[in-house]
Image (cartoon, rainbow, N blue to C red):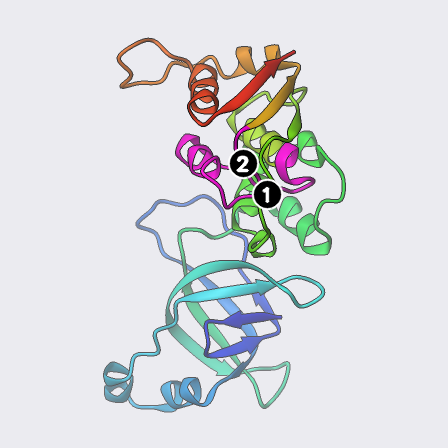
Amino acid sequence: MRTIGSSGQCLDAEGLYVEVTDEDESVTIELLGCLPSQRMRDYLTGSKRYRQRNPLGLAWLRMLDTVGEPWVDFWLSQIVDWRPSALDPQRVDLVAVWGVDSPLAGARDVWERWLVARPDRLNLWAEYEGVAREEWLTIVRRDQRRLGRPDRAPGRTYDLDGSHITDKAGFYLAIGEAINGPGGYFGCNLDALDDCLCGGFGARTPFTLIWQDSQIARGSLATSIEGMDEPFTYYDVILSIFQDRDVAVVLR
């Protein structure tokens, strides 16, 4: 089941996973078996003039997990077509313009794996690389089920498994699980990591981070950061952020 903003619900969707396209190329999604609200019914059956004066304001498609809990929101644009649904005569099928944050076809296996069940063990992401690993991080970042959890008290020690940090996505997936367990989030870029260390994302500083197999990240995150006054690598900046936010990092 998916929820279309506050305007209705649908049973399924076609075209959910998209190939990488040019930014100017529009992509559509078919929302099947939609049970629209009265406002949406009025919009669909109204004249062109009525629709212009009463825009629907369709903003997002909320995907629910297998137990019906909100999972991930996707941005939509306008409805471009609709028809009676073959799934149910009381429902309609909608065609809408898909947003730029659509899930990628090349990582469909990752999305469907999460849809069945949230990760229950560490490092399940490690078998993926490239686009699929980055899409795993996208899901971690956008998973609404992680929201609202309280921070653990300062002074704790966290163990960072660095054995699979072979790229930037791998670092953020590893630190997210070190702090918040399987499928956990703790940043997706340098700015987000800094924000997480200010609280509200599962841990309060000061704390100690024991970074196992740190030499792997030292090599894989050795790209230089442009715009810095001195030649710092991505790995160096991560350590600097930890230091600035009162995290004692033990490299092993």
Query: Which sits in the foreground, 161 or 133?
Result: 161
Q: Quadrant of the N terminus?
A: bottom right
The circle on residue 107 is 1
Q: Does the magenta stretch include residue 186?
A: yes
The answer to which image quadrant residue 204 occupies is top right
User: Which residue, as the protein is rendered here, is positioned at the far right?
Assistant: 121
Q: Do the residues labelled 2 and 1 touch (CB within 8 Å)?
A: yes
Q: Which of marks 2 and 1 is in front?
A: 2
**Residue at the location (56% across, 55% down)?**
148
> Disc 2 residue type?
Glu
* Magenta stretch: dominant secondary structure: loop
At numbered mark 2, what does the secondary structure look like: helix, strand or loop?
A: helix
The circle on residue 97 is none
To which residue does mark 2 refer? Answer: 134
Q: Where is residue 177 in the image (x, y as percent from the top left)?
A: 65, 36
Q: Is residue 122 left or right of residue 75?
A: right
Report the span colored magenta: 177-206
> Disc 1 residue type?
Ala
Question: Compared to 95, does 144 lie above or below?
Answer: above
Q: How crowded is mark 2: few (under 14 residues within 10 Å), some or many (20 or more)?
A: many
**Residue at the location (57% across, 82% down)?**
85
